[in-house]
Amino acid sequence: MSAPLALVTGASGGIGAALAFQFARHGYDIALSARSVDALSDVAAKLAGKGAKTHVIPADLGVPGGAMELLKGLQDLHLEVDVLVNNAGFGDMDPVAQAECSKLVSMVDLNVRTLTELTCALLPAMVERRRGGVLNVASTAAYMAGPNMAVYYASKAYVLSFTRALHGELKGSGVNATALCPGPVKSGFQDAAAMKGSLLLKLSPMMSAKKVAKAGYKAFARSKREVVPGLSNKLMAVSPRFTPTNLTMALVKRLQTQP
Ligand SMILES: NC(=O)c1ccc[n+]([C@@H]2O[C@H](COP(=O)([O-])OP(=O)(O)OC[C@H]3O[C@@H](n4cnc5c(N)ncnc54)[C@H](OP(=O)(O)O)[C@@H]3O)[C@@H](O)[C@H]2O)c1
């Protein structure tokens, strides 16, 4: 019998590459997608060195039609996805009134639209086979509103809400949905989001992508609804329940302001 296949988006680096390694370590073949072909090929070569069969399917997933391009790539290679890891995403630290609107819309396309389209396209076959599932990468940002990163926080709130509901819908189906909600992680994210110099980066302890990916894989394998890796991140995720919303937002805004 052939190995199950995990499709990982945003697998060219950071948390996505680390998740690809976790799934490969547990016997999965890996389909990798992102825009950077060279970086994807590097990750694929390292995975192959560990014995995993790999497939590289480059696609820009931050535009309408991006998910379709990836799905066509899978079809052309006759690949059946057992586990979908919706990891590709980016943020931007800028007040909405000053941000580039097209960048915010692309963020919604990548973080929300593509994630939804891939899930809708690949989930029915998983349910029919009564195995596999979806691991969606949200964030601790999902648990609160985030002034100066408004669209990013809102997009992750969508990912968490969507995944929680999927988890409920899929109970008893043999298929699982898990949300991985990391706090700050050392990766390409901070550069892409123009966060350098913010108090958030100065004050937050950073977890490694590997540690986060391990926690994500473990939670998925155990059919957990969601996981927040690390004690301080867990506290951050629950704190809005016990703190006035205005206070939480003022604090987040302070942390996410350029000096
Ligand atoms: N790092 C953190 O502090 C943190 C915390 C919580 C949650 N997260 C979430 O974790 C996920 C992974 O982020 P990361 O920290 O690993 O950041 P990263 O190192 O910047 O990785 C982002 C990945 O997404 C891909 N990507 C970006 N735009 C894309 C597009 N238009 N089409 C296809 N792929 C695209 C990138 O590849 P290409 O550039 O090659 O396309 C890369 O592989 C994201 O969903 C992020 O929101 C990160």
Image (tube, helix red, strand yellow):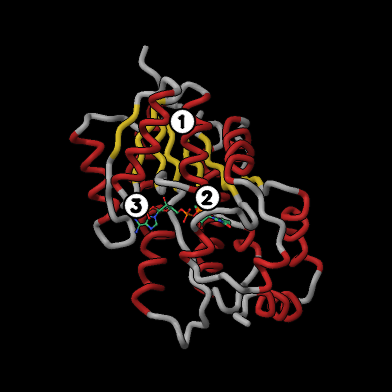
Q: Nearer the viewer, mark 2 or mark 1?
A: 2
Question: Which residue appears farthest toward the right when viewing the image?
Answer: 242
Q: CA distance from mark 2 to mark 3?
A: 15 Å
Residue at left offset 65%, top offset 62%: 143
Q: Position of residue 37 (x, y in %)?
A: 29, 46
The first of marks 3 and 1 along the sequence is 3
Question: Which residue appears farthest toward the top when viewing the image?
Answer: 1
Residue underneath mark 3 = 117
User: Within 8 Å of ligand 1, the CB of disc 1?
Assistant: no
Q: Is residue 147 left or right of residue 41?
A: right
Query: Is the C terminus in the top left, top right, bottom left or bottom right quadrant?
Result: bottom right
Which amino acid, mark 2? Val
Which amino acid, mark 1? Gly
Residue count near mark 3 (Cα–Cα under 10 Å), binned few <14, some 14–19, many ≥20: some
The circle on residue 137 is: 2
User: Within 8 Å of ligand 1, the CB of disc 2?
Assistant: yes
Instruction: Find numbered disc 3 in the image and state the secondary structure of the residue it sits on.
Output: helix
Q: CA distance from mark 3 to mark 1?
A: 17 Å
Which amino acid, mark 3? Glu
